[in-house]
Amino acid sequence: NPVEARQVAEAVLRHARETPRLSLGVAAFNLSQMQLLLDEVEILRRQNPDTDAFFAAHPDEPFFVKNLENIQGDERDVIFISVGYGRDALGNLSMNFGPLNQEGGERRLNVLITRAKQRCVVFSNFTADDLDLSRTQAAGVRHLRGYLAYAASGRLDLPRASGREPDSPFETEVAAAIRTLGMEVDHQVGTAGYFVDLGVRDPARPGRYLLGVECDGAMYHSGRTARERDRIRQAQLESLGWRIHRIWSTSWFENPEAELRKVRAALDAAPATPEDTPPPPPPAPLAEAVETDPGEAEDPPTTPPYRMGRIRGGQGVRTAEQLTEARLRRWILEVVEAEAPVHADEIVVRIRDGTPISRAGTQVRRRIEETLAALAQERAIHLDGPFAWADAERNVEPRDRSEASGVSNQLDHIAPEELRAAAVQAARDACRIGPEDLGREILRLLGLGSLTAQRREWLERAIEGWVEDRALREQDGGLVAGEGGRGERGK
């Protein structure tokens, strides 16, 4: 991509003149783009000898141009990233991004985008909206789309299809009708911890949604409290850029053609391209964007997103011998602080994924478990069976795992207290709910997908226990929140 390489080289020279006190590195996605960048920077340096002082000013952190495969371990104040890949001469965009499409591509991308200490600038000839994730299964490409959206807007709430099943036959029928208009529709589109029933895709930008359609009429939407929750929820979604169109089941069944015409009118009123929408707010500082506490929102209409712990400084650890006790203690505390209550197996996975160690063998697992036990003995953390807690109080609320890539979806990897809290919240929201519907709602609150036969059996046993300890109680053939379901700790 010679045009992009030239633009990056020009940005390097501007940096040399305007912010020479900050060290700089440039990264490309492949070797050919890296070589092109080197050539372009060299040409401009020869034409602008006044910038030579910058290139000699940081002996400890010299300027570099590297590719995705060999940037690991390098850090600079500022990093420029040249994506390089893009549209061909006919304007078509391939979903092939070299190393990102390979297994572990998301880890390579993670290494790349965490090299900057103060600022990272991404150069790309396409946007997140241009990437159609239905054309690829590569996790690296999915994460690239999310990062491009964040770089452009400063927001981490990129909408994407969750793969979850429709909530009701009504939702399925509405989706089928919208498809007769020639539009593509995704069910249960996740964004910032919320789920929109139907997302109607923009034909010009398949990675972008023109309209969100909410299908109301299920028991969950029937109560006054639920309606108020939906009102707040819609306001939050609209603040994130969604256009929401609501369809009531009674209106649909009485006259589906009229309701479909309203959908068509809403689609016609939606902007055809992102350029028609107001410009997004300026990007927030990286630290604020990453550290934002999802629990600060008032009266959140759904469960907060699961926040994963990050292993910092683990890229230099390649063998079990390099897993020193000091490192393990620091990393375990970081994971527990972010994710508690967290299963010991999850801690092992975070440490494995945060280092180049390919797998967590017996020796590595034993050392992590020994360090966990030592921290618990010192009361730096608290262990209850396989679950680690940050403090003794153990207050917990259900967390949505649908956007947390890499977190286990096994029910026995979720603390009993969190599952119980999800059950109580579901029963309280519904006023009264049947056991199977309760199971589905628990999974929805936790972002765990559909109710399989195995999960149904597991939850049936758990519900019996929650009734016994009065977190739930039976009433009129259904279940309601019980005396023991007021937020206190319970098993």
Image (spheres, helix red, strand yellow):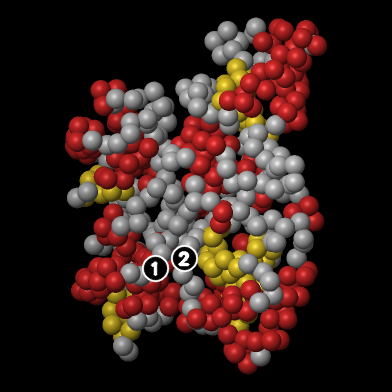
Say which element carries label 2.
loop
Quadrant of residue 198 within the rendered picture: bottom right
Q: What distance separates the C-alpha of mark 2 from that of mark 1?
A: 7 Å
Closer to us: 110 or 475? 110
Which residue is depicted at the point 48% across and 74% down? 167
Task: Work out whether residue 390 or residue 18 is closer to the camera in this orientation and state it.
Answer: 18
Residue 57, by quadrant, is top right
Image coordinates of residue 486 in percent, x first then y, are 34, 68
Left or right? Give the position of 64 relative to 349.
right
Q: Residues within 10 Å of mark 1 (few under 14, many from 20)?
A: some
Q: Position of residue 155 (x, y in %)?
A: 61, 47
Disc number placed over residue 164 in the picture, else none = 2
Q: Which mark is residue 428?
A: none
Q: Earlier in the sequence, mark 2 or mark 1?
A: 2
Looking at the rendered image, the quarter that the C terminus falls into is bottom left
Residue drawn where x is 63% and y is 67% of the image: 184
Q: Badge 1 is on which residue?
A: 450
In percent of the image, x 53 and y 51: which residue is there? Answer: 136
Going by the numbered disc 2, the residue's amino acid type is Arg
Q: Position of residue 382 (x, y in %)?
A: 25, 44
Pointer 2 and pointer 1: residues touching (CB < 8 Å)?
yes
Kindly identify the amino acid type of the residue bearing the numbered disc 1. Ser
Q: Residue at x 54, y 37 (%)?
A: 98
Name above or below for residue 258 compared with residue 210. below
Residue 433 showing in the rendered view: yes
**Mark 2 closeness class: few <14, some 14–19, many ≥20 residues within 10 Å:** some
State the image quarter where residue 422 is shown.
bottom left
